[in-house]
Structure formats: C-alpha cells, structure tokens
Image (cartoon, rainbow, N blue to C red):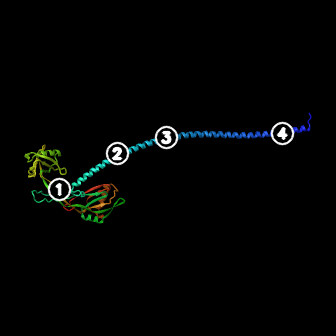
Amino acid sequence: MHFNMEDVQELGNRSLDGASKLKTIQQEIETCKADLGSLKKDIDDLERIKHELQHMTMEYAVRSERLQQRIESDKLEKDKQDLNLQKQMDDTVVENDNLIKEQNKVNEELARLEEEKSELEKQLKVSASMPQQQWTFNGNIEQDGKPGVKFDGKPYIRYPIRGGSAVITFEDETVASKILDMEDHEVEVGECQLKIKAHPLKLPMLGDVEIQTRVYKYRILVSQIPKLIPAEQLLDKLELHFSKQRNSGGEVANVEMLEDSGNVVITFVAEGISENLTKKEFHQVELRGMNKSIPLKISPFVMGEIVNITIGEVVSKKSILFTGIPDVMDEEILQDVLEIYFQKPSNGGGEVDAFAYVPEGKSGIACFEADNGNEE
C-alpha cells in the first residue's frame, strides 16, 4: 500500500482528533464519577435527614398525644372545680338566706325586747340607770290615820365592773388611802411590769325614800314557813286550812307564793277574815301527813310604792377601783399576783378583805353591804 503525504497528514489529523476526544471523554467520566460521589453523599445525607425526621415525627406524635391527654385531664379537672365552685356558691346562697332569716328573727326579737323595755321603763318610777339595790325594812305598821311609818333602810349595792379592772377592799382605811394617794402602781409579773391605776370608788347611796303603803283588807301574809313539803302541796294545804271557819278562816279566792321570800299570800273572798286572822300573830297549822302542827306567822299584807327617792354618792373608804389591767395570764393566777402585791407593806399595801378581778372582754358585779353600821 502506498500513502502519499496528504494521506499521512490526514491520518495524523484523525489520530489527533481521536486522542482529544478520548481525553474529553475521560474528563467527562471523571466529572460524572465526581458527580456520582456527590449524589451518593447527598443521598446518604437525605437518608439520614429522613431518619431524623421520622424520629422527630414519632417524638412529636408522642408529645402531641401526651399533650392531648393533659388537655383532656385539665378540662376534666376544670369541670370538677367548676362543679365544686358552683356547689360552694349554692351553699353560700343557702347559708346567706339562712343568715338573713336568722337576722330577721333576731331583729324581731330585739324589737319585741325594746317594746318590753319601753313598757318596763314606763312602769318604773326610779331611774333605770341606778345600780340595783335591795333594802331590808324594819318597823311597825300603823293604820287608821295614825302617823306614817319610819323605816330603817340597809343598803345592798351592786357596782358594775368593766373588763380589765379590779376592786380591792382593804381591812384598814389608812392602807386604802395610801394606795389611792400613790395612784400609779407597777406590778411585776415575771419579767414584765403591769402599770395599773388606782381610782376612788364612788358608790351611789340612798338619801331619802318616801313610800306610800296600804293594807289589803282581803289578804294575809303567811311567813316563817319551814321547807318541809313541795310548794304546790304546801299551797293546797294552806288553802284547805284557812278555808275552814273553825280555823277563823273563810272562802279562799287565791293562794300565791312569793318566790323571792318563800312567803305565801292568801286572798279571801269576804272582807273581815284577814283582819280577824291577824289579831293572833302565830297560828298552829296542821299539815296532813305530819305528826304535829307547825306555828306559822300571820301578818297583814302590805303593799308599798316608792313615790319619791333621792340618790347621793359616797366615796368608799376601804375599797379602791384599779383599771388598765391587761389580760396577760390565767385569771386566777393574775388575781393571786395582784392580791399578793397589795398585801405587802413594802408596796404601801396591807391586809386585803375582799378582791374582785374581771379580765378584759368580760364584766362583773361587786356587791357592797353596810359594814357594822358604818356608811360602807
């Protein structure tokens, strides 16, 4: 075979073009390999991300389920609380209605008591602000236009004591005067000191008492009755005894026991029976079921009405009022501490005859009687 120069040149050019194409192809193959590696890496990354997303999705599903359960639980709890709250509100409404009814009852009772108080105030001729007093009257009753009766009144005074106060009565007037002059006292109680104040005790006293009395012609007073039988039975037996003519009695209209004294008032139908019975001071009364008769005192039944009274004021010579006593310990212990303090001569005190202490939040009454004929 023969080749000329042109053929050789053409073959050379073809050979050069094939090598170039091969190189290009090899380069493209390398590029594809690199792209393939990158794609594999991307695929691996996507798989990893896919697994992560699946894991997160499962976690979110679990959390979502738990959250839903919690929401439902909270809703049930809220519904339960709402029911309890509604029940409490209903109970409160019922209780409020009951309180309103109770308040209305109390107001009605207060109104009734106010009416009673008003009626009692109309009946009383002595000031209601005066402390309650009891008197024992000694004297003889005269009738038929003879001079009036003069009574000897023995006072019995009830003095109100407020909480945080005490009333101490000393045996010696000098001690009481000294304690009163000191005015402020400091009493040691443990590590504390009680600062209390002494005040003069001002007691209301009767001045003049004018009493109108009258004798009831149809009634007698039976006194000095021994407590041997029940009151009801006693009234029946007295009515039976004094209704008989052989016992100087007559038809009985009423028999009543005076609860404060235990005496009995007998009212007769006819006039003159009571006058005849009172001519004899003591009557022997036979009570059925007893072996002997009992002497009972028979007196005219006298009713008295205070028509005029004057009240004065006297300062107690032996008793002192102390105020400002705090409630710091047991009532009995504190009273003992105060009494011991005021009995000591070193504190200006002396022998204590009587002691009345009222703690804070309470109230009490101190009672005073005549002391051996003196004013206090």
Q: Residue 302: name its quadrant.
A: bottom left
Q: As rendered, which of 129 and 291 lies closer to the eye?
A: 129
- Asked if the residues shown at circle 3 and circle 4 are in contact, with their CB atoms under 8 angstroms apart, the answer is no
Q: Which mark is residue 232?
A: none
Q: Which mark is residue 17?
A: 4
Q: CA distance from mark 2 to mark 3?
A: 37 Å
Sooner in the amino-acid sequence: mark 2 or mark 4:
4
Q: Is residue 98 left or right of residue 205?
A: right
| Amino acid type indicated by mark 2 | Asn
Residue 278 coordinates in the image, percent (x, y): 10, 52
Q: Is residue 112 left or right of residue 73?
A: left
Q: CA distance from mark 2 to mark 4?
A: 116 Å
Residue 65 coordinates in the image, percent (x, y): 54, 39
Sooner in the amino-acid sequence: mark 1 or mark 4:
4
Q: CA distance from mark 1 to mark 2?
A: 47 Å
- Identify residue for label 1: 305
- Identify residue for label 3: 73
| Amino acid type indicated by mark 3 | Ser
- Identify residue for label 2: 98
- Asked if the residues shown at circle 2 and circle 3 are in contact, with their CB atoms under 8 angstroms apart, the answer is no
